[in-house]
Image (spheres, rainbow, N blue to C red):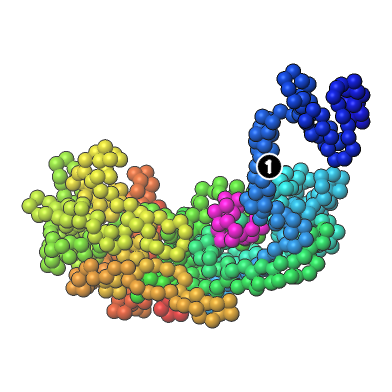
């Protein structure tokens, strides 16, 4: 023992006495027996000292190091438990309990007579839950190879490429990974049976849309394809859409892409339910822990009259074929509330091709066609208005007091300003012309006068023309419940100076007054301002959905009908313009309509847009004259004279409508 060694070393020291008991003393110094850690000191200078070997000054440094490492540990615990707690909790629970959506049934779209235009059909869809798939190796490779063999339209590399974008330890690994849909029944059944033994592979029946285009005849050649522009279609959600709409959708969802399906997506899709399930090692459902039912989407009743839609498309298609043309648009609407009864854009397309999943080859063929059948000309096509704008200009001049109903000008074939000549369409002119005759015979000279003025007569000027055109709904979207609507364009002095670097000339005002030059309108806008004259001065928002129903067809609400604008033209002045439009039928440019079973009114138009190609043919009108039920607007691209091309289409459709 150390004490013994000490004793031996000092056995000759004097005095040194060892006594029995708890303490011994050596020259007045006490110590505990056998406790060698205690200091033993001599009582005087120069005596030997036994001390501690540990430096106490290092204690603060050690404490700091311990505190630092403890802080790191606590910070890591806080990160794992608080910041990333939900993430790791979901990962842990995901191994046993999963939250699964219950998909709501998409609402049905009806026409105004409650004929279904859309339906939900069976669609077999295959997806992966990456976190449940076998780890990379022979087993996973074998599953992917078998799936590729059965599907027949995807290689192993295609599937692996999709899977390679998902990290197995990320939250995305718990989300469905779309592999294929629209799988044939036989293949779907085979995959369904096999997927029961494949961890992470799920085969489900997810409804997809199909549309009734009222096809008849061999090969579906007489389908009402123009309904596709109205209904649109649904398709698998894109990554961009998924990012935009967030948690409301999953990667295997379908979403409205065009038309009513897109615009009314929130109402049609409903509210998904959810259930908590317990899963086995394969990720397959074992039992339901809790469940919240889905709320099916709302059904929509459109204002579309399918029979009228079909008739309008047939008549237009026949006229286009006769003229060896392909492009045109037409609209029939109720002037008393803005309801669209028919909306045709030709050429059209089959939206069922998109709903079932269009192939790359089909899509490339479709978009490579020069006629651009995906383009909805009725709401997105922008054209010079031609003479259809003249009732608006006449109403503006009457309302501003530039003219009255008796103001007349002499038409001698046109007017000359310096070296520029602005012609009438009729050589030699139309003689003495007041506002009713000017509308009926589409007399350019009259509108040159009231639009831009001539000599001592002061016209509206560009500022007031644009002001009233805006009041009639031009230069802006109408607000129809379809995506992709164009605004049209109203030129101004400021625009021309900024864009073209030129000042505004009197000739620009003349062109604007007769619907030529830089002005652009859509066929829908023409129908909209025509309705103002039909109903006596109210501007309504055009719309396609008239009722919203529950999933069991109980009325939830009607679409509210409130004029966008009214009383901006006096009743007296509206009536003067109406009489001019009626005179266009009885003795003017649309007199072929005089044989209709009801009295009609209207305005023809010939819109020049190219010096090398034929102008667009236009007509807009309403009937019956005393109690209007419909407004009809027709445009045929490069059709020529409106009175010879557009009017016959309107005539045949109105004759059918009022005698069916």
Residue drawn at 46 percent across, 77 percent down: 557
Quarter assignment of residue 426: bottom left
Question: Who is closer to the viewer here, 82 or 510?
Answer: 82
Residue lying at the far top of the rendered structure: 46
Residue drawn at 79 percent across, 63 percent down: 279
Question: Who is closer to the viewer here, 253 or 509?
Answer: 253
Q: In the picture provided, is 270 more to the left or to the right than 137?
A: left
Above or below, comparing residue 229 to residue 77 in the picture: below
In what element is the residue under mark 1? Answer: helix
Visible in this render: residue 280?
yes
Question: In the image, is residue 245 part of the stretch drawn in magenta?
Answer: yes
Quarter assignment of residue 181: bottom right
**Image quadrant containing the N terminus:** top right
Q: In the picture provided, is 193 more to the left or to the right than 476?
A: right
Above or below, comparing residue 498 to residue 542 in the picture: above
* Residue where numbered disc 1 is placed: 70
Give coordinates of residue 407: x percent, y percent: 11, 64
Question: In the image, is residue 328 part of the stretch drawn in magenta?
Answer: no
Give coordinates of residue 258: x percent, y percent: 53, 59
Visible in this render: residue 53?
no
Please report the bounds of the magenta region as a residue range: 238-257
Question: Who is closer to the viewer here, 371 or 452?
Answer: 452
Give coordinates of residue 320: x percent, y percent: 46, 59
- Local packing at callout 1 (Cα closer than 10 Å; few below 14, some 14-19, many 20+) is few
Question: Who is closer to the viewer here, 449 or 172?
Answer: 172
Above or below, comparing residue 166 to residue 253 in the picture: above
Q: In the picture provided, is 387 more to the left or to the right than 254?
A: left
Residue lying at the far left of the rendered structure: 456
Quarter assignment of residue 476: bottom left
Residue drawn at 27 percent across, 59 percent down: 469
């Amino acid at each position: 023992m150390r004490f013994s060694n000490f004793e031996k070393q000092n056995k000759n020291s004097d005095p040194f006495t060892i006594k029995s008991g708890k303490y011994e003393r050596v020259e007045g110094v006490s110590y505990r027996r056998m406790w060698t850690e205690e200091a033993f000191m001599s009582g005087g200078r120069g005596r030997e000292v036994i001390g501690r070997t540990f430096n106490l000054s290092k204690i603060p440094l050690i404490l700091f190091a311990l505190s630092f490492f403890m802080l790191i540990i606590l910070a890591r615990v806080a990160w794992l438990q608080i910041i990333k707690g939900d993430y790791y909790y979901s990962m842990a629970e995901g191994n046993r309990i999963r939250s699964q959506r219950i998909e709501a049934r998409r609402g049905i779209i009806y026409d105004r007579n409650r004929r279904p235009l859309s339906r939900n059909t069976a669609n077999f869809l295959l997806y992966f839950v990456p976190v449940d798939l076998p780890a990379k190796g022979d087993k996973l490779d074998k599953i992917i190879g078998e799936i590729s063999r059965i599907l027949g339209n995807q290689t192993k590399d295609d599937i692996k490429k999709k899977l390679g974008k998902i990290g197995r330890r990320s939250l995305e690994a718990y989300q469905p990974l779309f592999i294929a849909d629209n799988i044939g029944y036989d293949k779907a059944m085979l995959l369904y049976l096999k997927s029961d033994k494949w961890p992470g592979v799920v085969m489900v029946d997810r409804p997809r849309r199909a549309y009734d285009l009222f096809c008849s005849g061999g090969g579906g050649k007489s389908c009402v394809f123009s309904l596709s522009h109205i209904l649109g279609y649904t398709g698998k959600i894109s990554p961009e859409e998924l990012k935009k709409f967030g948690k409301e959708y999953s990667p295997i969802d379908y979403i409205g892409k065009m038309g009513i399906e897109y615009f009314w997506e929130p109402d049609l899709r409903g509210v998904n339910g959810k259930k908590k399930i317990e899963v086995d090692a394969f990720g397959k459902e074992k039992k339901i822990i809790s469940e919240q039912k889905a709320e099916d989407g709302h059904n929509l009743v459109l204002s579309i009259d399918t029979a009228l839609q079909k008739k309008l498309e047939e008549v237009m298609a026949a006229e286009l074929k006769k003229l060896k043309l392909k492009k045109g648009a037409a609209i029939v609407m109720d002037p008393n509330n803005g309801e669209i009864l028919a909306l045709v854009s030709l050429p059209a397309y089959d939206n069922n091709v998109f709903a079932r999943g269009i192939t790359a080859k089909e899509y490339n063929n479709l978009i490579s066609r020069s006629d651009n059948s995906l383009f909805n000309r009725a709401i997105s096509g922008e054209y010079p208005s031609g003479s259809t704008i003249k009732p608006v200009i006449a109403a503006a001049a009457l309302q501003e007091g530039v003219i009255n109903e008796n103001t007349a000008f002499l038409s001698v074939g046109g007017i000359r300003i310096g070296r520029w000549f602005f012609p009438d369409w009729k050589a030699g002119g139309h003689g003495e012309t007041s506002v009713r005759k000017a509308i009926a015979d589409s007399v350019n000279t009259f509108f040159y006068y009231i639009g831009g003025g001539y000599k001592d007569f002061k016209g509206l000027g560009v500022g007031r023309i644009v002001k009233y055109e805006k009041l009639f709904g031009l230069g802006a979207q109408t607000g129809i419940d379809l995506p992709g609507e164009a605004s049209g364009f109203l030129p101004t002095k400021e625009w021309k100076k900024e864009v073209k670097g030129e000042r505004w000339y009197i000739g620009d005002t003349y062109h604007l007054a007769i619907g030529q030059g830089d002005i652009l309108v859509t066929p829908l806008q023409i129908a909209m301002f025509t309705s103002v004259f039909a109903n006596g001065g109210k501007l309504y928002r055009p719309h396609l959905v008239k009722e919203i129903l529950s999933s069991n067809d109980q009325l939830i609400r009607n679409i509210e009908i409130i004029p966008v604008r009214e009383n901006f033209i006096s009743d007296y002045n509206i009536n003067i313009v109406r009489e001019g439009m009626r005179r266009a039928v009885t003795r003017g440019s649309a007199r072929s309509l005089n044989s209709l079973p009801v009295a009609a009114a209207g305005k023809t138009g010939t819109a020049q847009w190219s010096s090398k190609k034929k102008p667009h043919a236009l007509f807009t009108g309403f009937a019956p004259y005393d109690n209007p039920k419909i407004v009809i607007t027709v445009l045929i691209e490069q059709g020529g004279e409106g009175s010879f091309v557009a009017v016959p289409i309107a005539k045949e459709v109105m004759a059918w409508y009022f005698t069916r």
